[in-house]
Image (cartoon, rainbow, N blue to C red):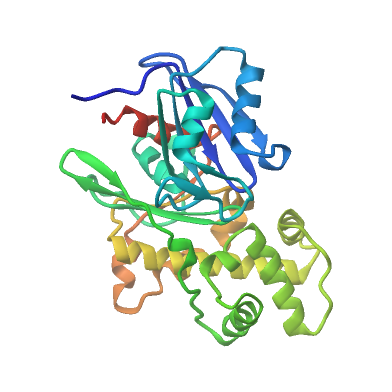
């Protein structure tokens, strides 16, 4: 016997900084009442959910789907980039839900890729996406999310992994020196250590260290802003390394998946870089894979820039799957 998730449905996209919620009133209805709550304003995830529902004033949802920035390996969830932790089964009981589906946030975002509209995407090089071919997904935000979508007959299967924690590659002496500093500081220089919000600051600090100057206490937004306005050469270098390293890691992912269906960049950082990202070394480094340069050159890269969190669409799709 199969069971569908009952309506109304609550959908959520929970990152290390913000939790976004939306509401699906009935079968076929669009996601509406999308609101963003800072995670730091709530002691627990359940508190954030209750705050959203109280503000919404529409009563009790029958089911909830959630994408969260964390690996889902069992009932217990402990967020990597935030202090929230919870039991999935316990949260379902606490919130009075008939069904609760919890998946990785980038698995959710991957499920949304076929639903994205042309105006929500900006292409950065490459040709046309091939139909019914694997798609790659990578996104720097609070952390570095990585996933993919592969065809399985008439369906799509989203990959759940932690590719943001692969070892960071270097392609020149300056990068090698920066990565060595990151490894010294953190023990392991993962891709996320450089290609994320915190990574922008870590790169800036490392550039300052190599240049023998004391870094200022900057936020990721400070580094980006100073780079884009040309007010800080070391911030500009940090952003340049960020884009180039993202190109290297995204190219590795594209090769691994054979992503002829396109490579998609999510997260909140790259859209804010705008044309500066297009002018960066990202595309050159994405394609710089020796004998497979021509293979990668045909792959389109799309920056996702949607007004509503696309991961909510993916979570809605996950709720549509029958038990």
257 sits left or right of 250 in the view: left
- The reply, left or right, for residue 128 in relation to residue 183 is left
215 left or right of 27 in image = right
Question: Extreme left residue here?
Answer: 153
Q: Residue at image x 53%, y 41%?
A: 305
Quick check: can you spot residue 116?
no
In front: 41, or 143? 41
Q: Kindly identify the residue that appears in the image at 82 percent across and 64 percent down.
A: 217
Q: Is residue 163 visible?
A: yes
Depth order, front residue of 59/170: 59
Q: To which quarter of the image does residue 138 belong?
A: bottom left
Q: Is residue 31 above or below residue 16?
A: above
Give the vertical position of 274 relative to 199 (above or below): above
Rendered location of residue 175, percent (x, y): 58, 80
Looking at the image, the residue that sits furthest to the bottom is: 173
Instruction: Name the image quarter holding the C terminus.
Output: top left
Q: Quadrant of the N terminus?
A: top left
């Amino acid at each position: 016997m199969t069971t569908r998730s009952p309506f109304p449905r609550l959908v959520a996209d929970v990152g290390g900084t913000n939790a976004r919620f939306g509401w699906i009133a009935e079968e076929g209805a669009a996601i509406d009442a999308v609101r963003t709550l800072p995670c730091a304003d709530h002691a627990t995830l359940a508190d954030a959910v209750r705050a959203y529902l109280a503000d919404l004033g529409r009563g009790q949802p029958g089911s909830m789907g959630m994408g969260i920035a964390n690996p889902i390996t069992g009932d217990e969830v402990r967020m990597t980039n935030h202090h929230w932790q919870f039991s999935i089964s316990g949260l379902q009981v606490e919130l009075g839900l008939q069904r609760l589906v919890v998946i990785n946030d980038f698995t959710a975002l991957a499920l949304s890729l076929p639903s994205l509209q042309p105006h929500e995407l900006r292409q950065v090089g490459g040709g046309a996406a091939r139909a019914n071919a694997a798609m790659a997904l990578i996104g720097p935000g609070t952390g570095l999310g990585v996933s993919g979508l592969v065809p399985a007959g008439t369906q799509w299967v989203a990959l759940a992994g932690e590719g943001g924690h692969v070892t960071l590659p270097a392609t020149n002496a300056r990068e090698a020196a920066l990565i060595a500093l990151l490894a010294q500081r953190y023990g392991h220089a993962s891709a996320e250590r450089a290609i994320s919000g915190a990574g922008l600051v870590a790169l800036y600090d490392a550039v300052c260290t190599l240049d023998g100057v004391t870094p200022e206490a900057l936020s990721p937004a400070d580094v980006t802003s100073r780079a884009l306005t040309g007010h800080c050469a070391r911030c500009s270098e940090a952003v340049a390394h960020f884009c180039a390293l993202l190109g290297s890691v995204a190219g590795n992912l594209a090769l691994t998946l054979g992503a002829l269906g396109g490579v998609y960049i999510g997260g909140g950082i790259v859209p804010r870089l705008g044309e500066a990202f297009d002018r960066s070394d990202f595309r050159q480094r994405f394609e710089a894979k020796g004998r497979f340069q021509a293979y990668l050159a045909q792959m389109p890269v799309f920056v996702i820039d949607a007004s509503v969190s696309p991961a909510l669409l993916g979570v809605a799709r996950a709720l549509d799957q029958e038990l």
